[in-house]
Image: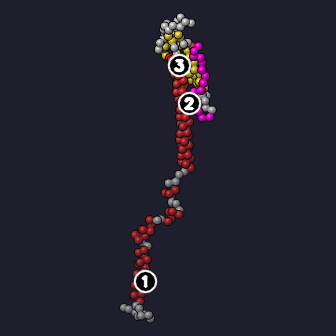
C-alpha cells in the first residue's frame, strides 16, 4: 500500500530511507567497525591509566641508580689515579736500577792489574778502591715536566773477599710521592784483569 505524497514520493520509501540511514549509523558504532580507530587510544595518552603509572621510576629507584653511578665513576677515577702513581713509581725504580748499573759498570771498567809494573807501587795497578767511587747525589733519568725531579743517592761499597776477589755493591736510594726511601741494590764480584 502506497500513499501518495505531495511531492510524489511514497511514504514507505521515506520510511525505508530513514531506516537505512539509522542502520548505517548503528553499523558504524559497532566495535568491529571501530577497531582501526582504537589503535590510537586517545584517552590513555591524555590521562594515564593505572598500568602506565606502575611503569614509571620512583624517587628511591632514581636515587639508588644515581648512587650506583657515582660509586662506579668514583672507582674508575680512583683506579686511574692509582695507575698513574704506580706508573710513576715503576719509572723511578727503573731509572734507579739503571743508575746503579751504570756505577757498577764503572767499577768493572776500572783497572785492576796486580802484575803490572808500576814504579810507584810494587803491587801493580788497583783502581777498584772506594776512594775512586764517592757517593753521588743526582737526579734520576726520567722525563721531566716542570719540577718533578727525583733525587737519588748512589753509594758504592767495595769489599776484599779473597786475595784476588772483590765484592762490589752499589745502592741507589730514592724517594717518590712522599714515600720511601726505596733502595735498588746491585752486587757483583770482581777479579783482576777483567
Left or right, 123 with reference to 21? right
The image's colour scheme reads secondary structure
Q: Nearer the viewer, residue 70 or 97?
A: 97
Q: Position of residue 150 (x, y in %)?
A: 60, 28
The disc label shown at residue 142, or none: 2
Residue extending farthest to the top is: 122
Residue extending farthest to the right is: 147
Instruction: Please report the residue visible at 50 percent of the width from the left and 65 percent of the height from the top.
Output: 43
Q: Quadrant of the N terminus?
A: bottom left
Q: Main secondary structure of the magenta part?
A: loop
Q: Position of residue 66 (x, y in %)?
A: 55, 46
Residue extending farthest to the left is: 1
Q: Which element type, helix, strand or loop, lies under badge 3?
A: helix
Magenta span: 131-146
- Distance from Cα at disc 3 to Cα at disc 2: 21 Å
The disc label shown at residue 106, or none: 3
Q: Nearer the viewer, residue 55 or 108?
A: 108
Q: Which element type, helix, strand or loop, lies under badge 2?
A: loop
> Is residue 18 at least partly visible in the picture?
yes
- Mark 2 burial class by Cα count in 10 Å: few <14, some 14-19, many 20+: some
The disc label shown at residue 81, or none: none
Q: Which element type, helix, strand or loop, lies under badge 1?
A: helix
> Is residue 181 at least partly visible in the picture?
no
Q: Is residue 48 magenta?
A: no
Residue at the disc numbered 1 = 18
- Mark 1 burial class by Cα count in 10 Å: few <14, some 14-19, many 20+: few
Is the residue under label 2 in contact with that under label 3 (CB below 8 Å)? no
Instruction: Please report the residue visible at 56 percent of the width from the left and 6 percent of the height from the top.
Output: 120
- Distance from Cα at disc 2 to Cα at disc 1: 102 Å
Left or right, 43 with reference to 4? right
Q: Position of residue 163 (x, y in %)?
A: 49, 6
Amino acid at each position: 500500500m502506497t500513499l501518495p505524497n505531495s511531492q510524489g514520493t511514497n511514504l514507505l520509501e521515506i520510511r525505508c530511507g530513514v531506516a537505512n540511514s539509522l542502520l548505517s549509523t548503528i553499523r558504524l558504532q559497532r566495535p568491529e567497525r571501530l577497531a582501526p580507530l582504537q589503535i590510537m587510544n586517545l584517552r590513555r595518552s591524555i590521562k594515564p591509566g593505572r598500568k602506565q603509572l606502575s611503569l614509571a621510576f620512583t624517587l628511591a629507584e632514581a636515587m639508588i641508580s644515581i648512587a650506583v653511578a657515582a660509586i662506579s665513576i668514583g672507582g674508575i677515577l680512583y683506579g686511574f689515579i692509582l695507575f698513574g702513581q704506580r706508573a710513576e713509581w715503576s719509572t723511578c725504580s727503573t731509572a734507579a736500577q739503571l743508575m746503579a748499573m751504570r756505577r757498577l759498570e764503572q767499577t768493572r771498567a776500572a783497572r785492576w792489574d796486580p802484575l803490572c809494573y808500576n814504579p810507584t807501587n810494587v803491587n801493580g795497578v788497583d783502581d777498584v778502591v772506594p776512594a775512586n767511587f764517592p757517593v753521588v747525589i743526582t737526579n734520576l733519568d726520567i722525563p721531566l715536566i716542570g719540577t718533578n725531579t727525583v733525587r737519588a743517592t748512589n753509594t758504592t761499597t767495595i769489599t776484599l773477599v779473597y786475595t784476588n776477589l772483590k765484592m762490589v755493591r752499589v745502592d741507589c736510594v730514592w724517594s717518590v710521592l712522599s714515600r720511601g726511601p726505596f733502595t735498588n741494590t746491585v752486587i757483583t764480584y770482581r777479579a783482576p784483569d777483567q
